[in-house]
Amino acid sequence: MRRAVRSGTLDEVLRTPRVAIIGAGMSGIGMGAKLRMAGIESFRIYEKAGGIGGTWHANTYPGLSCDVPSRYYSYTFAPNPSWTHVYSPGREIWAYLDRVARDYGLYDRISLNTDVAEARWIDGEWIVRTGEGEESAYDFVITGAGGLVHTHKPEIPGLQSFAGAWFHSAEWDHSVPLEGRRIGVIGTGSTGMQITRALAPVAGRYELYQRTPQWILPLANRRYSRPTRWLFGRIPALNRLGYRVWQAQIEWMLGQATVKDGFARRFISTACRVHLRRVRDPDLRRRLTPDYQPMCKRLLMGTHFYDQFERPNVELVDAAIDHVEARGIVTQDGQLHELDVIVLATGFDAHAFLKPMELIGPAGLRLSELWDGEPFAYRTVALPGFPNVFTLIGPHSPFGNQSLFTISETQMDYALRFIELWRRGELDAASPSREATDAYNAELRAAIPNTIWASGCQSWYIGKDGLPHAWPWTPARHREMLAEPQLEEWELVPSSGRARNGGESQVPSNSRASSPSPPG
Ligand code: NAP
């Protein structure tokens, strides 16, 4: 690639890109840190919530953890020798993100409680407008707004008339006492499973409302001993090795198993079926047995879920919910289940990417119109017709049981390549062509039927078109696709030579985020 180093020192010829980052979750914090590492100070991170951390700020439910190994669920540039567990609790993950944000001096760049309503391309720059009407100009917009943000709250008749407390798992009401109470949890996804393990032992009565059984891969959690943590602290290479070992295992097993038939798929399938045999009561085992293939829905991972049903206070309710009344849930078999607390562990609308923010491109093209309810991107990371916009964990990113840190970092590095080109004056604007985007999406759709997600089940991957919106290849293919920008697939606006001196002073500084507080 041609380098535009002309005369004088490198710093003298570099332009200063103004970058808006939407979201201070894992992606936004990582992007901010990477910009700082590249010597770019002229950015601002907009965060609509009152704290950083994204999903790890919103979710505070009892039992919250991550079923991706923590050593791998981390940034490559910020290893954490102090993880207490192989699969660490949610609060620790939040503390890790907080530490990275502090270490990279990001808090003075983050505007909390600030939602972005709109970004509009006017005269070669993005004008970002917040919900409060404040406008700022940028050269790049990078979205890291998360995929599982908009809570799905089913319209269960009578729910509003319930006399006890009810809330969604991602909006946990910590003022509600739980010990000894009668608790009903609706939903048996990863969240429902984690809540069950935490609350079944302390509830007076615990009922799990299951519409569809789930497969569970048994992965035992383990605490890291003090000497082990000390060793990881003393020998940084061990962290890097741990990261790569977990990555190799997960990408090889789960990455392969989801996208092609073979040993990995059979191995995981067998492990799930053997795990289910822990349920000794044949009738209960039958009710907990899914009628679809393991991994068709996002695979649950962990142990000690089935054991909970051996407790006398715990019941699996698989009769369909009819309605809710003041005293509790009434199932279609006519039974009233009296409850004090109802938790909706009913998931998220995974297809509401970036909503309600609107992007308006050069020709007045609105992203909501381009997508029309079916989000798509170029290679997960960019949008045709929207110059200098990059989407972290954008449409069809490889998620499932992979580490989103790793996926997002690949996308951050890709975005940085374009920012560097801009910085060196090699272009003013870049967006993938519609033809290249369509060709990529056609290839992607053709590969979807081969994946496990299309093997016949209902899941949050499924979009309006009835197809799973997922990455149909291995995570390695994602890295390959984003290793080098294929500039021939991009529409590039050459540099006008116009000096841009965005600089720190022109990016609105932040006064609201200087004293962060951890989630409750
Ligand atoms: P989810 O996987 O979408 O599960 C939602 C559950 O609610 C399902 O069991 C669903 O039943 C049930 N449900 C929805 N509407 C219902 C209704 N009207 N009546 C009865 N049941 C209803 O949601 P989630 O458990 O919150 O997990 C979402 C995703 O978040 C996960 O797949 C994962 O990617 C991520 N997550 C990750 C971790 C982690 O450890 N890494 C932990 C938690 C969450 P059906 O199956 O019948 O639709």
Image (cartoon, grey):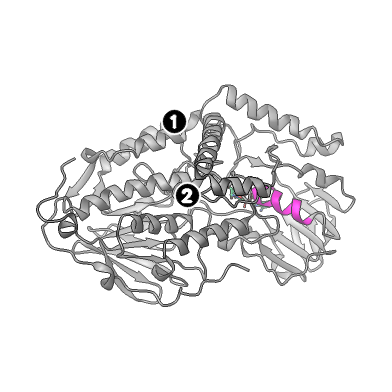
- Crowd class of label 2 (few under 14; some 14 to 19; many from 20; radius 10 Å): many
Q: Which residue is mark 2?
A: 75
Q: Dividing the picture into quarters, in which one does residue 109 lie?
A: bottom left
Which of the marked residues, 2 or 1, is nearer the chain's N terminus? 2
Bounds of the magenta span?
187-199
Residue 77's disc is none
Tag 1's secondary structure? Answer: helix
The amino acid on which the numbered mark 2 sits, given as a three-letter code, is Tyr
Residue 447's disc is 1
Q: Residue at x 61, y 60 (%)?
A: 59
The image shows residue 500 at horizontal and vertical percentages of 18, 64
- Crowd class of label 1 (few under 14; some 14 to 19; many from 20; radius 10 Å): some
- Determine if the magenta segment contains residue 193: yes
Label 2, ligand 1: CB separation under 8 Å: no
Query: Does the image show residue 53?
Result: no
Taking the image as shown, residue 317 lies to the left or right of residue 123, namely: right
**In the displayed structure, would residue 300 be above or below residue 198?**
above
**In the displayed structure, would residue 377 be above or below residue 151?**
above
**In the displayed structure, would residue 115 be above or below residue 348?**
below
The amino acid on which the numbered mark 1 sits, given as a three-letter code, is Ala
The image shows residue 278 at horizontal and vertical percentages of 81, 35
**In the displayed structure, would residue 235 be above or below residue 277?**
below
Which tag is nearer the camera, tag 2 or tag 1?
Answer: 2
Q: Quadrant of the N terminus?
A: top left
